[in-house]
Amino acid sequence: MSTDEPLDAEYVEKHREDVEHPLIQLFVRFGEGARHWFLLGILSSIGARGLSLVPPVVLGVALDAIFRNDAPFALPGVPSAWLPDATVDQFWFAIGLMAVAMVGQAFLNFVRQTSLNLFSHRVKHEVRTATYQRMQRLDMEFFDETQTGELISILSNDTNRLEQFLDSMMGEAIQLGVLMLGTAVVLLWLNAQLAAVTLVVIPLSILFTYWYTRLAEERYTDVRSSIGDLNSRLENNLNGIQVIKASNTEEYEDGRVEDHSYRYFRLDWLALRLSFVYRPGLQALTSLAFIATFVVGGVWILEGPPGPFSGDLSVGQLVTFLLLTQRMVNPLAQMGNIVERYEDAKASTKRILGLMSLPVRVADAPDATDLGDVDGRVVFDGVSFGYDDTPVLEDVDFEAQPGETVGIVGPTGAGKTTIVKLLLRLYDADEGAVEIDGRDVRGVTLASLRRSIGYVGQDNFLFDGTVAENITYGRFDATREEVVAAAERAEAHEFVTNLSDGYDTDIGERGVKLSGGQRQRVAIARTILQDPEILVFDEATSAVDTETEMLIQRSIDELAADRTTFVIAHRLSTVRDADAILVVEDGRIVQQGTHEELLAADGLYANLWRVQAGEIDRLPDEFVERASARVAREGIGSGEPTD
Ligand SMILES: Nc1ncnc2c1ncn2[C@@H]1O[C@H](COP(=O)(O)OP(=O)(O)OP(=O)(O)O)[C@@H](O)[C@H]1O
């Protein structure tokens, strides 16, 4: 981590802000397979709005030509030879034209909605799956730093928001554009002077909207992040519900959730308040344009052209003006909605694309090759590592020969699990190299590396599903016989057959319907089925009773016989027979050797052994002092709840 910036929240935020033209990028990357739907949607939007202009124009012309007889029957863009001469025919022609335009508009609206919805749902699906696929491959460091709620919010809320914008608001935006343009053309064609009065509303609305957008963007960004925080809090609490109940901290958690919810409410309210001014403001502007047009047009017809105006204005023209102005009110008031949704969609897309463009540092090198058949020689060569700037491992050196069992012991927080995380390449060493069969783990493909290592931890995650599904996880082609054989070797078969549906029993979310020891045995069975060449047991038997531990130990010993095996244990008796034992303290290997050698050396191991064997009551002072210094440094057990 020393050479690269840490992948923390600040880095992610900065990265997100750097995303340029988010919506255009989104179209280019995800719209490809559905571009024809998009195009059809846009064309039918334009067509529908264009047709909506026909009835007011035809009505105005019909009023003057048919009912008042003070103008010829002429329609913009239609040759007069095509129009009927007789007044009655003109009347029916006008009605027919309006009817065709209205039906055509309804049909095109149907086409618009269907095609834009198809487009947006498809984009949503592609964005969501691509985001998940990318997220899954991001570095562990990213997951250490990012709250799950925040990630869920990106996968669900942000993609939904995007879809809403794409399927409705984008169509509305296009229609609004066509309406403005079409109305402007018709009004200018009818009477350019009066059109200047009516159309002044358009630049005013755009200015007003620009002002609103600038303010709203900032506020909506805050709203989004507060939703992420709230989701994270809820997610954390629901996961920790047992601890909350057991620690009697319901009220404390009520308060924390209330604080987050209140922050969201306040920020959302601030953003909403702005829209309360904006929307009525736009409505007032369009109403003003309507009244101004009516006043100027009315006076013009009654008393001749007022003030600077000149020329004629007919009743039919004024009716068309008023109808078209009135028709602009609602769509213009929608402009706020469109802008809001646009800002929302932009912020959401930035979050999505920001996440997708995060660098993956722990990934296959361009020239990475398959690890192939593994003998199991593991070497740590001068390895140093820290999750952030604090060093956790320093200059770790050891070698494990094929088939050997290596115990790793040492106080809590010493760095034992970190050693195996580097072996699995969940993180990369800052200095030195981790090698398997003489090959640096950074030079082989992650898939082949992780396939060759089986890891059983202290608290293994089981998926919602049946026992059998959990055992075959990662080896989906395994037969029932193989599953049963693996469970037998993991000492799990007996308890599984006693469950209500045997191997088909549903074990609940995270396997909550099983006991800790049962979950552990299912996890071991899963590893046995995968048959990896290198095994890691990280406190694998700490959750089971002594009897089960002996049984599991027997199967571990059998499995370990011909594979390189690492066993991390606090109970030293577990690793007593190991070929080598590494004693880790404060990120360094302070002793290594066999059980007998370490006893003879009379260091930390020998003293820990004597305490555990009951030969002495407590560790000698020098070890106790070191341990309390460590506890003080790390704040272990301080009991302070962290936010
Ligand atoms: N993801 C992480 N991000 C930051 N620090 C971490 C992370 N995981 C572990 N640490 C820190 O690294 C140090 C070593 O942790 P590690 O889990 O390797 O210890 P351990 O020896 O396995 O402890 P235990 O016996 O309690 O399992 C600890 O100080 C721990 O707080």
Image: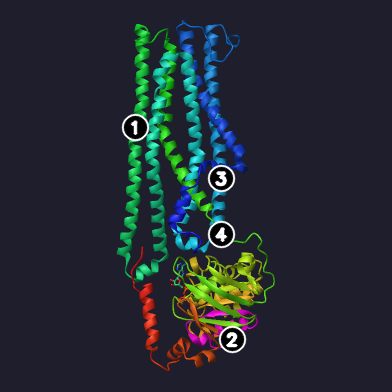
Query: What amino acid type is highlighted by mark number 2?
Result: Asp
CA distance separating discs 1 and 2: 80 Å
Image location of residue 43, percent across then percent down: 57, 31
Q: Residue at x 39, y 89 (%)?
A: 620
Q: Please tell me whether residue 95 is drawn above or below residue 329 in the rendered image.
A: above
Is residue 153 positioned above or below 560 on the image?
above
Q: Find numbered disc 1 in the image and state the secondary structure of the residue it sits on.
A: helix
- Whether the residues at callouts 1 and 4 have beta carbons within 8 Å, the answer is no
The span from disc 3 to disc 1 (Cα, nearest Å) is 33 Å
Residue pointed to by mark 1: 280
Which residues make up the magenta segment? 551-580
Q: Which mark lies nearer to you, 1 or 2?
A: 2
Q: Which residue is mark 3?
A: 123
Labelled pair 3, 1 in contact (Cβ < 8 Å): no
Give the percent coordinates (x, y) of residue 386: 48, 68
Q: Earlier in the sequence, mark 3 or mark 1?
A: 3
Disc 4 target residue: 137
